[in-house]
Image (cartoon, rainbow, N blue to C red):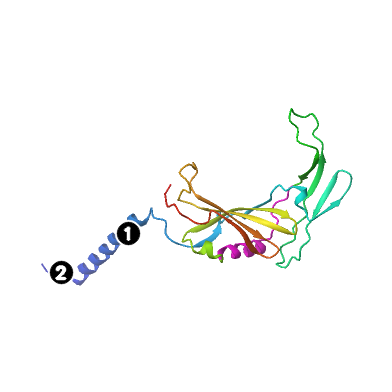
Amino acid sequence: MKITTKSLGIGIVIGLVVSISVIFILVKDVILPTSSVYPEDLTKPIQQYYQYSNIGSCSQIKEINDSYRTCIISNSNASGIGNLPSPIFKYFNPGGASNYPPPAGFFQVGLKTNLLSQEQVEKVIDVIKNDPGIKSQSFAWKIRDMGFYPFKYSWYDDVRLVIHGIRDSSERISCGWYSTVTIDLNTLTITKRENIDVISYEKC
């Protein structure tokens, strides 16, 4: 039987399609190495919020009136994003509100959100992207949210990360490898890394 050029071409195309389909089936459940950092939801801004802080974490305390105090963070703001709106604390005396009331004192109120501009958020993401510990893990790290808190002379940002598709503990019900990177916003340096070394590849 004579094989024409047209028949040969059709056969090659069919062979390529089959090969690609087989490869797709083999790798579709495999977590491919990407080594990237980006928001968990690309259609929305990254959630930002004040973490609850104790008035004792302020480098200075300024009295507003008898009931309110504010926290003054004294820093050089070398990065240009180290100064966030000062948290406000209000005096509460729970008294006999419950059988075990907390002691009277100043508690943080009026928690703000979306504290950094998009440009400032990108600066924080760049710090994480360029961290050797993060870069050494060949996964797609997604940023879940950012929580800010003052401590003495700096503002800090706890950036919560997740790798979807693998489980970081057999005891954990939810799916994902969860990590936290803490950044000093005054110097734009990472001060703490939690659970960034991926040692389990159990898919979920």
How crowded is the residue under tag 1: few (<14 C-alpha within 10 Å), some, or many (20+)? few
**Which residue is farthest left?**
1
Highlighted range, magenta: 111-129
Residue shown at the point (48%, 61%) measured from the top left = 137
Instruction: Tell whether position 113 is magenta.
Output: yes
Q: CA distance from mark 1 to mark 2?
A: 28 Å
Magenta stretch secondary structure, dominant? helix
Task: Tell which of 94 and 46 is nearer to you.
Answer: 94
**Which residue is farthest right?**
65
Q: Secondary structure at mark 1?
A: helix
Task: Tell which of 155 and 4 is nearer to you.
Answer: 155
Q: Quadrant of residue 80?
A: bottom right
- In the picture provided, is 138 more to the left or to the right than 105? left
Residue 23, labelled with which disc? 1
Residue 3, labelled with which disc? 2
- In the picture provided, is 123 more to the left or to the right than 171? right
Instruction: Tell whether position 163 is magenta.
Output: no
Name the spot of residue 151 as percent of width and height, x first.
Answer: 72, 55
Q: How many marks?
A: 2
Whichever of callouts 1 and 2 sits on the residue coming sooner in the sequence is: 2
Q: Is there CB contact under 8 Å for labels 1 and 2? A: no
Name the spot of residue 108 as percent of width and height, x first.
Answer: 76, 45
